[in-house]
Image (cartoon, helix red, strand yellow):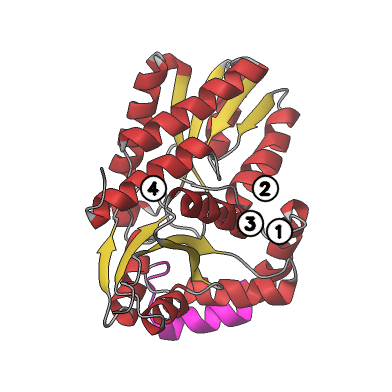
Amino acid sequence: MPDTPPPALLVVNLGTPEAPTPRAVRRYLAEFLHDHRVVQLTRWLWCPLLHFVILPLRGPKAAAKYASIWLPDGSPLAVHTRRLAAAMQARLPDWRVLDAMRYGEPSLAKRLQALRAEGIRHVVVLPLYPQYSTTTTESVRDVVARASAGLEVRFIDDYSVDSGWVAAVVASIRQWRERHGAGEHLLFSYHGLPQRLARNGDPYPQQCEASTRAIVQALGLRDDEWTLTYQSRFGKERWLEPATDTTLQALAARGVHKVDVVCPGFAVDCLETLEEVGIGFAEQFAHAGGDLRYIACLNDDGLHADALVALAQRAAGTDA
């Protein structure tokens, strides 16, 4: 009798360009911004605007930003996601654990096809988005629905208040404070979302609030010691507020000079955390006389890997 194929776990992140060059960035952004979950304008209006205005303008600028954070092994998001998947594989020796990307490579659709070709039938899909949104988590589900024929898939929608994940975030903040001391204020900066989507029922802001409350309660913080904000606005419509950059300006105006920023909506470090927060916002805050100190994402931290492994085991029904 042949051996029973092992279960598989796909650890899925957003995606990243393959190189910090305008051509590679344009190719990546074209795929990302073509997703109707990300931009919901009609295609006849959006596609010409995307290809003839946005990509030619944003490609070179975004490439320079990627170049400022690129690691010897590649994009930080790709490198940290691979390392996290490897840490989880070490904890799940009887599983196949692979990283995958919604946009770019390694393609989620190709990963599912390869697993099916190997004879694997049971797959857990874990999008690395602690908080659910139709723009991120549901887009991963779209791919799974199209590419998972013949597979039994268990899908993890979110882990915004999972006790293991909250404990990992809390531990990372405490370790930072033990090494560097506590700042005067702790900012929780999440990726933004158009207000229109939240009004239409996307639960993302409520999940960000729930995550933040769970973390600050575990840390024992008073309400005046922290603020929840949103970053990475795009386009002209109104996005979730308060915005991280304007909140930092307000803190500087109040005489708050040492601010720590943590980004619990990002599982691993990427352009939005390392460049937008760690470089861009830090420089803006420094110009206002402040010191912004960025607390790294969980990346392949052991507690992070433990928490996500436990999520996968529960989803598969194999937890002890």
Confirm or deny contact between disc 2 and disc 1 (CB under 8 A): yes
| Residue 207 numbered mark, or none | none
First in sequence, mark 3 or 2: give its number.
3
> Could you tell me how far apart the alpha carbons at marks 3 and 2 are, in whole angstroms?
16 Å
At mark 4, the secondary structure is: helix
Left or right: 297 with respect to 280? left
Dot 2 surroundings within 10 Å: few (below 14), some, or many (20 or more)? Answer: some
Relative vertical location of residue 157 with respect to residue 115 in this rendering, above or below: above
Most foreground residue, 68 or 159 = 159
Residue linked to disc 4:
309
Q: Which amino acid does label 1 sit on?
A: Tyr
Relative vertical location of residue 155 with respect to residue 49 in this rendering, above or below: above
Q: Which amino acid does label 4 sit on?
A: Val
First in sequence, mark 3 or 1: give its number.
1
First in sequence, mark 3 or 4: give its number.
3
Most foreground residue, 28 or 88 = 88
Select label 3 or label 1 by which is in front.
Answer: 3
Estimate the x, y position of residue 130 in percent, counting from the top left. Answer: 38, 47
> Could you tell me how far apart the alpha carbons at marks 3 and 1 are, in whole angstroms?
13 Å
Residue linked to disc 1:
66
| Residue bounds of the magenta highlight | 38-54
| Residue 79 numbered mark, or none | 3
Q: Main secondary structure of the magenta part?
A: helix
Q: Residue at x 49, y 67 (%)?
A: 101
